[in-house]
Image (cartoon, rainbow, N blue to C red):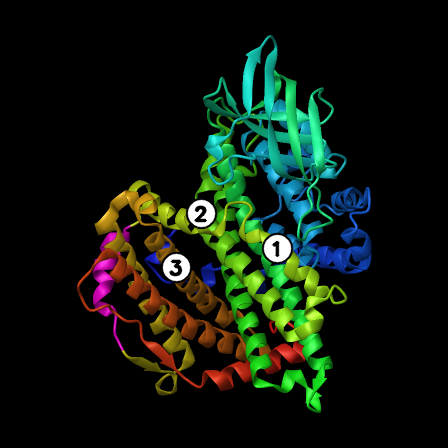
Amino acid sequence: MAKQRSGTFMIQPACSSEVFTPEDFDTEARLMGKAAEDFVRNEVLPLLPEIEQAKEGLMRELDRKMGKLGFTAAEVPTHYGGLDLPKTTVALIVEKLGPEPATCLTLQAHAGLAILPLVLEGKPQQKERYLPKLASGEWCGSFCLSEPASGSDALAMRTRATPTNGGYILNGEKMWVTNAGFADLFTVFAKLNGEQFTAFLVERTYPGVHLGREEHKIGLHGSSTRRVAFENVFVPAENLLGEVGKAHYIALNTLNLGRYKMAASALGTGKYALELATRYAKDRHQFGQPIANFGLIRRKLALMATHLFALESMLYRTGHLIQAWFEPLHDLPPDYPELHLRYREAASEYAGECALLKFYGTEVQYLCADEGVQIHGGYGYTEDFPIAKIFRESRVPRIYEGTNEINRLNFTQHLIRQMQRAGLPLLEEARTQAKTLRNGELSVADTTAQDALCTLAQQFRAATLLAFQRAWGAYGEHLREQRQEVAAAIAEMAVYLYGLDSILARLPKLRGSNVNAGELMALLFAREGALQLNDKLDLIYGALGINEPVPRVPIPRFNAVEAANRLAEHVLARDGYPIA
């Protein structure tokens, strides 16, 4: 498995044979996905009333069951009792748990946010002590970063650690701590001596660890979310995690991989929202016929399916790219010198794509939930229908693990880093490709759909590179701080480039009715992308004060109404997501 640098999609098209898609899953991965799907459908969804009432002990019991099924061990090295599964399989498990977001979040916080800091930066003795318990589900973990006065600006935290004989004294308060109500181990971030950003492993039983009440959230009622206070907590010296003053590597890289899995969760929840909306549209009759017959309802179903297809194509492509960086680490011994540095490199390489997937994925999830409620009409606004719960629980993912605004900025800043440190030739390619932009329309009828889509992908690439080049010329590496609106617009343009590029690599692998559905979704996504890129180019040129004609991406010309109706037929035939 050859490693590829992050951001390569910005400068060259994907090769279909090198891009991983859901069609490439092997039998073992499909079995893991099936186990997760059966678990959530057969054992979790029937318990929704109890989950919504936050029945005491229920979520912890579900977490233990996920441990027995191997879900909590997915990213733990085999040396410590884990499965060390490929990142694509990990995402598949999370996706299949998506229909019940609270349970899915519990797993993500345990198997991701709690376990990954140990995997990435833990010393062999720490891993030996804690990872087997966490991997099996015997223990549950939690991640303590946010504070009442510091959210996106994590470095402004007030929690302090002071050296003492044999260890450290910890004081401070963390909030929005997922799994806090039943966690056995907390990964806590604090400033050592008030300055050095450092992480500590804190067991729940340590004297001075206090839990607040459960937060009264809009949704995710089954998920435990509390404040955790540390009052003169003694932490043994051997529980300092990673290096003094370098906990930002732990936090950032754990969140990088967490954002990737958030997109997987969003995909699963979005697919479930589409399923609920489709079944309701077929059952609900108005004016003597199912509302699924109405054009505006069918357009909604097509829109939801199209964005889910783009998200799915980007998600699994990215997971495979990340895996290529982790693959060489599997056979290294636990005491390999500077193993943590190798993990840092692997976990940080695709930070940009993970940020992009997080903000796009959670917005697709919300789109599906919102349109699902709209299709249900007034019934969707009652708790009698499950779409209401999905709607409530689809709002907060745009906030946690880095707000979507922050992740837009993170993506563009990552491109700058890749250009400066990894030699990604963004500016050179921008100059080369700028002349290829052409105005007007692109008639799909005059060529094959595949050729038209390839042309559009090249146009998307040229436009996104041009936007980056212009912004770099105006602000350089200070773009994020000085003109956030432009940095965010570049990230939004990149979504359509990466999405269309990933879809194009996937289309040749589709079979049967999936071929037609995939092509329809590709065309609809490309049309929306062309309109959006032109809007962003206009915004960027205006913001930068460029007194030149704004280049235009050609708009693909085809009957989009007919395409959406044909795609809706596939959705209705499948009772949801149209790709089997």
Please name the amino acid that badge 2 sits on: Ile
**Residue at which label 1 appears:** 265
Residue positioned 69% across, 69% down in the render:
380
494 falls in the magenta region: no
Q: Assess whether mark 3 and mark 2 are in contact (beta carbons under 8 angstroms).
A: no
Location of mark 3 (residue): 494
> Which numbered disc covers residue 95?
none
Name which quarter of the figure residue 178 lies in. top right
x then y, percent, for residue 139: 74, 34
Q: Residue at x 49, y 71 (%)?
A: 507
Q: Nearest the camera: 448 or 183?
A: 183
Mark earlier in primary sequence (1, 2): 1
Q: Earlier in the sequence, mark 3 or mark 1?
A: 1
What amino acid type is highlighted by mark number 1?
Ser
Residue appearing at x 81%, y 59% in the figure: 46
Q: Main secondary structure of the magenta part?
A: helix
Q: Where is residue 132, by image quadrant?
A: top right
Magenta-tinted stretch: 425-439
Residue hosting label 2: 406
The image shows residue 189 at horizontal and vertical percentages of: 55, 29
Structural distance between the alpha carbons of marks 2 and 3 = 16 Å
Secondary structure at badge 2 equals helix
Query: Where is residue 471 shown, x and y percent of the image?
Result: 26, 53
- Residue at the extreme bottom: 288
